[in-house]
Image (cartoon, helix red, strand yellow):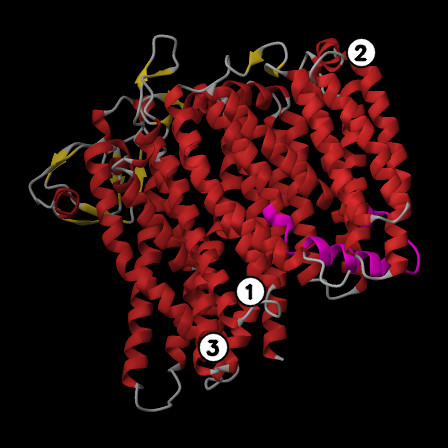
Amino acid sequence: MLAASMALAMFASLVTYAVLAGADFGAGVWDLLSLGERSPAHRAALARAISPVWEANHVWLIFLIVLLFTCFPAAYAQASVALFWPLHFVLIGIVLRGAAFVFRAYDAPSAASHAAWSRVFGASSVVTPILLGMCLGAVSSGDVTVWAAPFPFATGILALSIDAYLAAIYLAWESDDVALQEDFRIRAVVVWWIGGAASVAALLLASTHAPHLWRGLTSFPAAALVAGGALLAPLSFAALWFRRYHAARILGAGQIVALLSGWAAAQWPYLIYPELTVTGAAAPASTLTLIAVTLPFGLAILLPSLWFLFAVFKAKTAK
Amino acid sequence: MSSLSAARAQMEVSLGFHMIFAAIGVAMPAMMLIAEWRWIRRGDADARRLAHVWAKFTAVTFAIGAVSGTALSFELGLLWPAFMAFAGPLIGPAFALEGYAFFIEAIFLGLYLYGWDRLSRWTHWWCGAAVAVSGALSAVLVLAANAWMQNPVGFEMGVDGKPAHVDAWAVFLNPAWPPMALHSTLAAYQAVGFAAAGIYAWTLWRTDRRDAYARTGLGIAMAIASIAAVIQPLAGDVLARRDYLHQPAKLAAMEGQFTTETRAPLRIGGWPDTDRAETRYAIEIPAALSFLAAHDPDAEVQGLDRFPRDQWPNVPANHFSFQIMVGAGTATLFAGAWYWLARWRRRRSDAALPWMLLAVLTACAPLGLIALEAGWVVTESGRQPWVIYRVMRTADAVTPIANVWGSLSMFSGVYAGLLVLLIVFARRLRASEAR
C-alpha cells in the first residue's frame, strides 16, 4: 500500500515533468527548426515563455529520480546499469541544453555566438527527449538492457513529438502576435500527425516487441485510458484547428496524461518488467513512511510557490 | 583504465565541478539581498547595479549548478549502483527534503530574476530571501547524506547483505552531520565572498581606488566572507575532533601521523613517505596535535600503524589537501582582518584603502575556492577505501560496466569547456560593469 502510493507519487512527478518540462524541450525543438524572417521573433517568444519557469519544471525530474532511489533502490540500481550509456547521453544533453540556454541569454555578444548557442540548445532539446523516451520504452520492453531497438526508438520519437506538440500549443496560446500564433499553430498541426503516427507505430511494435505491455494495453483499465487519450487527441486537434488555444492547451495536456496513465496501468505492477515489481523493489517500511509523511508538508510549501510562479509569469491578462 | 579508477575520476570531476556552482548558489543570493536592501532602504544606485549584475551571474551559475546537480543524482547510481541499492533508503530522505528546498530555490529564483518589473520592491526582495534560505538549506540537507557515508547510522547489517532494521529518520539524528553541515556551508560563503571581493579589490587597485561602486561591492563581499572566515576555524576544530574519535585513520592521514604516539606534534608541510612510514621535512610543533585533537597535550593520537595497509587512505593526497585547505583558509582570515582594520581606521575619513591591502585581497580571490575543493578532497579521500565507512568498500560499489573511461572523457570535456566559458563570461560581465 505504501509502496503503491510512492509509485503513484513518482508517476505524478513523471506526468508533471512531461506536461511542463516536456514543453520546454519542445520549445528547443522549435528553436532549432526556426527559419525565415520571423525566426528572431520565434526565438524571443519561446525564450520569454520558458526563461522564468524551465528550472522549476526541470526539478520534477530530480524529484522523480530521488523518489526512485529512495523508495525503489533496486530498480534504480538495475536501470543505472542497464541504461548506463543512454542515461549518460541524456545527462550530457541536459547539461549542454541548460548551459547553452543561459549562455545564449546572458553571454552572447555576437550574432555568431548567439547562433552557435542556439544550435547547441536546439540539438540537445531534440536528442534528450528521444533518449528519455527510449529509456522508458526499454523499461517496458521486457529486456531493459536493449534500448537501441525498434520499440524504444518509437517511444523516443513519440516523446519528442509530444514535447514539440505541447510546446507549439502553449506558444500559440501565449503569443499576442497573430502571425506568431499562426506559425506555432501550423507547427502544432504538422507535429500532431507525426505524434499520431509515432503512437500507432509504438503500439504496433509493442504487440511484437513488448508483449507484456501489449497485453496490459489491450485489457482493462489501461485500454480505457488509452482509448480516452485517443479520444482527446482529435479533440485537441479540433480546438487547435479552430484556434481555441485555451481549450487546445488543456486537451493537449490531458491527452498526454491519458497516454502516460495507460502506459503506467499496463506496466503495473512492474517497475522494470519482468524483474522488479513495485513491492519487490520497495525500500523498507521506515523509509517509505518517512517519505509519505513528509510529502504533504513538502507539497504544502511547493504547490503555492508554483502557483505564484505561474500566476506571475503565465497569467493571461488581455485575452 | 579500470572501471574503479575511471568511476572515481568521473565522480571527482562531476562533484568538483558542481561544488563551485553549488557554492555560488548558496552565497551569491545573500550578497544580492544585502545590495538590494541598501538600494531599497538608502536609494543607493550602486547597490542596485550590483544586485543586477550579481543576479545575472547567478542566473548562469544556478542553471549550470542545477543541470550538473541533476547529472549527479543519476551518476550516484550509474557509477555506484551497489552503493545506492544499499544506501538509497537510508540517505534518500535527506535528498528528498533537499529536493523540496531545491524546488523552492528554483521557483523563487525564477521570480527574482525575471520579476524586477513585475513584483513590488519588497516582494521581490522576499523572493530573493527565499532563494538564499532554501539554497543554504539544500546544502545543509545534502551534507546529511555525506555525513552518513562518514558515519553510517540507522540500520544493522542483514544476513542477505541488505540493511536490516532500517530507521530512516536516523540520517537526521547523525552526530556527524551538524559539524559537517556547518563547516561546508560556511566554506561556500567564504569561497564566493573572497572570490567576489578579489574582483572588486582588483578594480580599486588597478583603476580607481575611490570608485564607490567597487567599494560597495567589496564591502558586501567582505562582510559575507569575513563572518564565515571567523567561524570557520571553530567549525573545523569540532570536525577534526570528531575525526580523532570516530575516523582516526582519516585524521592520521590528514596529519601525516604514521605511528601512534602521545604528545603527537602538529606537522606543517612535509612529505608523507608511505614506504618509510614517516612524514619528512615537516615543521613540527610538539604536542600540538594531541592538544588540538583531544584538548590534552599528553593524549595519544592513533597513527596509521593501527590500521591494516589496505585500509589506509591516500596519505600524501590527504595530507597535502589538508595543508592547502588550512593554509588558504588562514590566509583569507588574516586578509579579512586587515581589511576591517583598515576600514575601521578610515571610519571618519573618505580615504582610499592602501594598495597593498587591495593587492593582497586580489591575490586571495581564488583561495576560498581552493580551500573548498581541498577540504572536500580531505573528507572524501580520507574515507577511502570505504564508500560507506567500515560497511562497504568503494571497489565493491562500482558499476560492472567496462568502458567507464568513455563517460569520464565526455564529462571531463564538457565540464572543462563550461568552466572556461564561465570565466570568459565573468570577465565580460565585469567589463560591462566598468562601462
Three-letter code, disc 1: Ala
Tell me the magenta residue range: A30-56
Quadrant of the rendered image containing residue A235: top right
User: What residue is shown with label 1?
Assistant: B55
Three-letter code, disc 3: Ile
What residue do we see at 59% from left, 37% from top?
Answer: A61
Quadrant of the rendered image containing residue A89: top right
- The image shows residue B239, relative to residue A143, as above or below, that is below
- Residue that sits furthest to the bottom in the current view: B349
User: What residue is shown with label 3?
Assistant: B40
Element on which disc 3 rests:
helix
Q: Position of residue B226 (x, y in %)?
A: 33, 65
Sequence-first tag of 1 and 3: 3
Q: Position of residue B313 (x, y in %)?
A: 34, 31
**In front of the other: A16 or A243:** A243
Chain letter behind tag 1: B
